[in-house]
Image: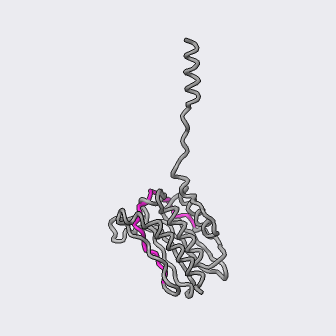
Amino acid sequence: MRPPHASVLAIVAALISAAGAGACSQSGLPSLPSAPPPGTQSSITPTQLETGAVAAPATPAPEVVTIAAGTPTDIYARVASGALRCWFGAGGPLKATHIFNAEAAPPTEGGVAEIVVHERDLTSRDQRGTRALRVAFVGRGGSVEVGISPLKIGPPMSELMVRDVETWAQGGSGCNARALEAPAQVPAPQASTAKSKATQNTRR
């Protein structure tokens, strides 16, 4: 029987590969590696995804901590999968200016994991620039402490991203960060215009 963490990481890797395979073949962007076998170092290399602009805060926001039931490996897999689909997927809010990077220790070594979102630096070989957001996963006796630190992403985007991580860590889905992408548009007053024309014709 395969350990539970292996199947979880395999599912996340499959989602990541499926999301990036088509784009990589068309644009030359690298795809993420598949999940490593149990007992080996798990590392998701930086993606070369194009991401959207995010305002930087004047001072870093304080770390937000949420507690989730499970293992660091499981919670890390949930959040990494959600981030790649939501923040860095097609039309994602970070698709033009940021790089996703994540690493996880094997479960036999505690499964401590970390996700770091870097600003894209075209002068750097791997394009990883300043750290913009960090999510750390640490086991605390049957539960996982998830620490979310917005470093160079300001509100309201940072607040939506924190909410996303909290939701994914608890097993939920969704993408709050995309709420800023499509501001509501005021519909054209077609009915009023038609009524006005009808009134003018009557007066004539």
Q: Nearer the viewer, residue 175 or 11?
A: 11
Give x and y (percent) for residue 12. Answer: 53, 73
The residue that appears at 33% across and 71% down in the rendered structure is 125
Give x and y (percent) for residue 32. Answer: 44, 72
The residue that appears at 41% across and 61% down in the rendered structure is 50
Tell me the magenta residue range.
Answer: 41-62
Give x and y (percent) for residue 201. Answer: 55, 16
Residue sticking out furthest to the top: 204
Q: Which of the image's four quarters has the C terminus?
A: top right
Q: Nearer the viewer, residue 158 or 50?
A: 50
Give x and y (percent) for residue 72. Answer: 59, 78
Q: Nearer the viewer, residue 146 or 152?
A: 146
What color scheme is it?
one colour
Q: Does residue 18 appear to the left or right of 199 in the view shown?
A: left
Q: Which of the image's four quarters has the N terminus?
A: bottom right
Q: Does the magenta stretch mainly form a helix, a strand or a loop?
A: loop
Where on the picture, by quarter, is residue 74?
bottom right
Q: Is residue 63 magenta?
A: no
Q: Nearer the viewer, residue 86 or 204?
A: 204
Q: How many marks?
A: 0
The residue that appears at 42% across and 69% down in the rendered structure is 47
Rendered view: 34 above or below 168: below
